[in-house]
């Protein structure tokens, strides 16, 4: 016993795993005093310390490990685990990179959060979405309600669904000011153009070549992802989102109907600007809803999805609209079947009206213009567009231009009386004609050089192509 106690101790051999990360980890694994977390960190460190050139060695080692599994199912399980482990490691690396980048951005970004939010609120909706995906700091700022005060989700192809619309409206909440949805086929049209905004499979040239004798619908729209419930979020939370909404523009939402649109308008009492294009909704019901709910409205643009087929407008609806929406300054009803006495109620009734567009409207002959310039309503008109009105009569246009020469409509700056098929004759609208002696275009240009006058007519046969532009209009 004494010999054993006094015997010199054996020299310690150096650990063979000291310089080998993999063996060092193996040594840790058999040490019960090393925690599982430390073991995981050791294994991860061992993998990360492998050089980039060891990929082939890793592949050979994995193949040997597979060969050691006799059962095919065990081999598949091992491969699956390797793929999952690699995916988890890749995701962990990306997450850490994003975190470090976010910290870096927060230190180097010059603007404080409030100014960052202000800048983001000036971006269009698509750019805002791209910005939100940049880093967590930008994402946090981009989630502020102020960034969604003006939502524009219009596209040239259907790719926005109800969930996206609802999410953005909810993010905006009470600060929502403007909402634009649907499919817009092309750039914004000039005030003198009557090219339809209705989304079609055909190009704009085909749409512009629409013939009055062609009874087929101009619609031809492809199915839209948006449905009738896309505006439901405006009414949610006791109508908080729609309460302060000022502008609502809807384009070619094929599944939108009267009930859904009227429900949305009932949640928007502060609406100032309403634009509706290509929706399958009735003119009368829509105007009734506007009259009932949108008393502050200043601009109304409504284009029919089917030219000349909607004859629903009634005189009492016109009267109610005039009485309940006295602030209207801009009115466009394009492609509807409108009669002159109803149009006269509207134009004469709105005492602040400056902009009128009845392009491609069916049944208008022009008699509503008689003595209009001297009345309370109508004498403030600055823009009047009667382009391609099928029944617009040559004699009524002549009387109107004579009234301008005589001194009426002193504020008028833009007039469009063009018609691709010519004006209708007095006795028979099927007889299309243009007589320079009956329409005093030259006299108007001499007496009122401040007016931009568009008078484009076909050149075939007895019809003469004429365009006169004088002065400037903005």
Image (spheres, rainbow, N blue to C red):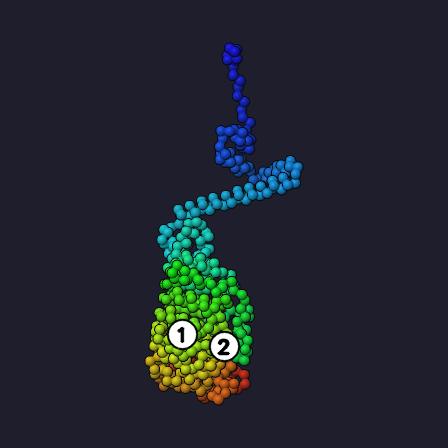
- Quadrant of the image occupied by residue 232: bottom left
What residue lies at 61% left-to-right and 38% top-to-bottom? 62
Between 58 and 444, the one nearer to me in the picture: 58
Q: Earlier in the sequence, mark 1 or mark 2?
A: 2
Q: Residues within 10 Å of mark 2 (few under 14, many from 20)?
A: some
Mark 2, secondary structure of its residue: loop
Disc 1 to disc 2, C-alpha distance: 20 Å
Residue 453 is situated, as x and y percent measured from the top left of the image, at 42, 79
Tally of numbered discs: 2
Q: Residue at x 37, y 77 (%)?
A: 319
At a point 36% along the width and 51% down the height, the residue shown is: 112
Judge the density around disc 1: few (<14), some (14-19), many (≥20) Cα neighbours within 10 Å. Answer: many
Front-most of residues 412 and 150: 150
The image position of residue 459, as x and y in percent, is 52, 82
Could you tell me which secondary element the residue under label 1 belongs to?
Answer: strand
Residue indicated by mark 1: 331
Q: What x and y, as percent, mark residue 119?
A: 39, 56
Circle number at residue 419:
none
Asked if residue 468 can be seen in this view, the reply is no
Q: Is 138 or 474 nearer to us in this picture?
A: 138
Where does residue 115 sit, x and y in percent of width and height? 36, 54
Task: Please give the name of the residue rendered at 43% of the width and 52% of the height, measured from the top-left corner.
Answer: 139
* Residue furthest left as drawn: 376
Q: Residue furthest top?
A: 2
Question: Which part of the image, by quadrant, shows the C terminus?
Answer: bottom left
Query: 236 or 353: nearer the eye?
Result: 236
Above or below, comparing residue 445 to residue 276 in the picture? below
Q: Name the residue that disc number 2 marks.
A: 309
Q: Nearer the viewer, mark 1 or mark 2?
A: 2
Q: Are marks 1 and 2 in contact (CB under 8 Å)?
A: no
- Residue 341 visible, this orientation: yes
């Amino acid at each position: 016993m004494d010999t054993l106690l006094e015997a010199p101790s054996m020299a310690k051999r150096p650990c063979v795993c000291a310089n080998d990360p993999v063996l060092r980890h193996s040594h840790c694994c058999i040490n019960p005093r090393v925690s599982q977390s430390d073991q995981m960190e050791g294994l991860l460190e061992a993998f990360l310390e492998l050089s980039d050139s060891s990929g082939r060695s890793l592949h050979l080692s994995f193949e040997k490990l597979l060969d050691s599994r006799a059962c095919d199912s065990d081999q598949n399980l091992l491969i699956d685990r390797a793929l999952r482990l690699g995916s988890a490691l890749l995701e962990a690396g990306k997450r850490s990179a994003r975190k470090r980048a976010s910290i870096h951005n927060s230190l180097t970004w010059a603007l404080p959060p409030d100014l960052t939010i202000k800048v983001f609120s000036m971006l269009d909706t698509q750019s805002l979405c791209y910005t939100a995906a940049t880093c967590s700091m930008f994402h946090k700022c981009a989630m502020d309600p102020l960034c969604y005060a003006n939502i524009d989700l219009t596209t040239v192809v259907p790719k926005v669904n109800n969930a996206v619309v609802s999410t953005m409206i909810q993010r905006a909440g009470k600060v929502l000011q403007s909402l634009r949805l649907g499919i817009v086929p092309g750039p914004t049209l000039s005030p003198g153009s009557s090219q339809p905004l209705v989304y079609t499979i055909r190009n704009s040239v085909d749409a512009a070549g629409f013939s009055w004798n062609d009874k087929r619908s101009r619609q031809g729209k492809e199915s839209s992802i948006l449905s009738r419930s896309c505006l439901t979020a405006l009414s949610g939370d006791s109508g908080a989102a729609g309460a302060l909404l000022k502008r609502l523009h809807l384009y070619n939402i094929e599944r939108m109907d009267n009930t859904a649109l009227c429900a949305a308008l009932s949640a928007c009492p502060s609406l100032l600007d309403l634009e509706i294009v290509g929706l399958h909704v009735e003119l009368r019901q829509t105007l009734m809803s506007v009259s009932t709910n949108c008393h502050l409205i200043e601009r109304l643009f409504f284009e029919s999805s089917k030219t000349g087929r909607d004859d629903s407008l009634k005189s009492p609806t016109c009267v109610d609209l005039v009485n309940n929406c006295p602030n209207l300054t801009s009115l466009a009803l394009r492609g509807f079947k409108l009669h002159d006495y109803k149009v006269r109620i509207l134009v004469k009734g709105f005492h602040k009206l400056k902009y009128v567009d009845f392009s491609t409207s069916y049944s208008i002959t022009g008699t509503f213009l008689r003595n209009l310039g001297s009345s309370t309503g109508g004498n403030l008109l600055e823009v009047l567009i009667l382009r391609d009105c099928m029944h617009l009569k040559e004699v009524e246009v002549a009387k109107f231009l004579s009234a301008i020469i005589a001194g009426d409509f002193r504020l008028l700056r833009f007039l469009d009386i063009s018609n691709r098929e010519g004006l209708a004759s007095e006795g028979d609208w099927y007889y299309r004609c243009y007589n320079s002696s009956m329409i005093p275009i030259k006299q108007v240009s001499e007496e009122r050089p401040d007016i931009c006058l568009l008078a484009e007519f076909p050149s075939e046969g007895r019809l003469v192509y004429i365009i006169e532009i004088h002065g400037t209009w903005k």
